[in-house]
Image: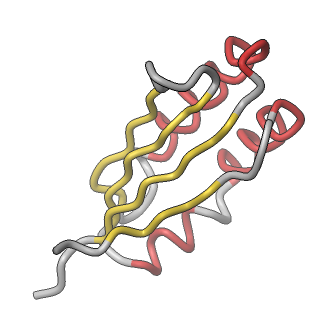
Amino acid sequence: MTSSLRVVATIPIDPARSADAAPALAALAEASRGDAGCLGYEVYESAAVPGLFVTVEEWESQADLDLHMTQPHVATAFEVAGPLLQGEVAIHPLTPL
């Protein structure tokens, strides 16, 4: 039995524009929950760092995550959030200890 893949992504948005990004990121999470192999997908805004959004995801496999990244709802979210970024999006696949 293989274990699922857990991923955290950080999305640094210009704090002055975070209200513009939030609906697109919430829509991304909602749509992503319907993707094949998605076991969980939540998005949060950091209470410690203004403008920093964090996704917490769980996928059945790397192939499911790879397919997710090709979906139209991912492209749409990046179209909206891309111009609002204040830094690089970082995707962190997690390895349990």
Q: Residue at x 55, y 61 (%)?
A: 91
Residue 20 in picture, x, y percent from top left: 74, 16
Horizontal side of residue 71 vs 61, given as left or right: right
Residue 8 in picture, x, y percent from top left: 43, 54
Residue 70 in picture, x, y percent from top left: 67, 65
Q: How is the image coloured?
A: secondary structure
Rendered view: 71 above or below 32: below
**Going by the picture, which residue comes out furthest to the front?**
48
Number of marks in the image? 0
Horizontal side of residue 25 vs 44, given as left or right: right
Q: Residue at x 55, y 74 (%)?
A: 66
Quadrant of image for the C terminus? bottom left
Residue 41 in picture, x, y percent from top left: 38, 44
Q: Quadrant of residue 27?
A: top right
Rendered view: 83 above or below 20: below
Quadrant of image for the N terminus? bottom left
Return the residue nearer the eye: 48 or 81: 48
Return the residue nearer the eye: 24 or 93: 93
**Going by the picture, which residue comes out furthest to the right?**
83
Horizontal side of residue 59 vs 27, given as left or right: left
Q: Residue at x 68, y 52 (%)?
A: 89
Q: Quadrant of residue 44?
A: top left
Q: Residue at x 28, y 55 (%)?
A: 39
Rendered view: 56 above or below 47: below
